[in-house]
Amino acid sequence: MDASLPSLQFIDVTKSFGPVSVIRGVTLDVLPGERHAVIGPNGAGKSTLFNLVSGLFGLSTGDIRLKGRSIAGLPPHRINRSGLARSFQITNIFHRMSVFENVRIGVMARHGVRYGLFRPIAGKRRINDEAREILSLVRLDARADDMAGDLTYSEQRALEISMTLTTGADVILLDEPTAGMSRDETARTVELIRTVTTGKTLLLVEHDMSVVFSLCDRVSVLVYGQILATDTPARISANREVQEAYLGEEAAS
């Protein structure tokens, strides 16, 4: 792969549901190693855009490329194996399994390993060690033996982020990772995201502008299915069109 290529490219992407046009000609490059946020009012098409890039929806027209290769039309599992992982707005974990088992399942899937009594001991140890390493990274190692359903909301979100890491993907999509969190929980989650995405490419949808402006290198504003502006957080905050369309006058104060 050419290292100069964007990690993720949207090329004149459109998506319609019957007569309703939701995404209207989005062209955007997400650069290698950057943390890039997509913001916009409710109904702007942010979740639809995420569903397109992760393969849950098919494109109407245009193309999406992951590290230079088209992923348009690929099913989600093929896109995941190509190096892209996504978390959702609603936590997507196995509540009746332990925290450790949740992560181990993801590690096993990446290595193509299924549960079995006769798995070689060395292979089992390697998978367990990798799962513990990831739990340590997201600071859930002390909760490894607890049921996932017993975690606090912010811990469940951390567990879900850890499950995206089990895929080994270097392009991470996070859909409103701090939604519903207190200020303290949000601060901890931002630091977690900053840690686990070091050296990776992050595409983020987030409503909390303090999170976006403190975490991300660039911001794209999506309004009525179109990119209104893409720039640094400071320039987006000062952009008069963006203020009028989304951020409000207080963003400039």
Image (tube, rainbow, N blue to C red):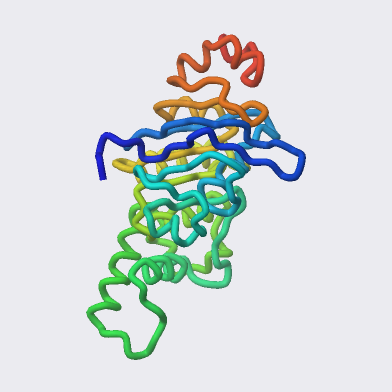
Q: Nearer the viewer, residue 61 or 44?
A: 61
Name which quarter of the figure residue 198 lies in.
top left
Q: Is residue 233 above or below residue 208?
A: above
Furthest residue to the front?
Answer: 61
Q: Is residue 10 above or below residue 109?
A: above
Q: Can residue 33 be seen here? A: no
Quadrant of image for the N terminus: top left
Furthest residue to the right?
Answer: 19
Q: How many marks?
A: 0
Position of residue 134 measured from the top left corner of the image (x, y, whole percent): 35, 58
Q: Nearer the viewer, residue 209 or 22?
A: 22
Position of residue 138 measured from the top left corner of the image (x, y, whole percent): 39, 52
Position of residue 209 measured from the top left corner of the image (x, y, whole percent): 55, 27
Query: Does residue 85 appear to the left or right of 132 in the view shown?
Result: right
Q: Nearer the viewer, residue 93 or 15?
A: 15
Query: Does residue 83 appear to the left or right of 219 in the view shown?
Result: left
Quadrant of image for the C terminus: top right
Q: Is residue 45 above or below residue 174?
A: above
Which residue is rendered at x = 40% and y = 69% of the image?
109
Q: Can residue 60 be seen here? A: yes
Position of residue 166 measured from the top left corner of the image (x, y, whole percent): 38, 60
Q: Nearer the viewer, residue 78 or 207?
A: 78
Which residue is rendered at x = 43% and y = 26% of the image?
218
Name which quarter of the figure residue 141 lies in.
bottom left
Name which quarter of the figure residue 96 lies in.
bottom right
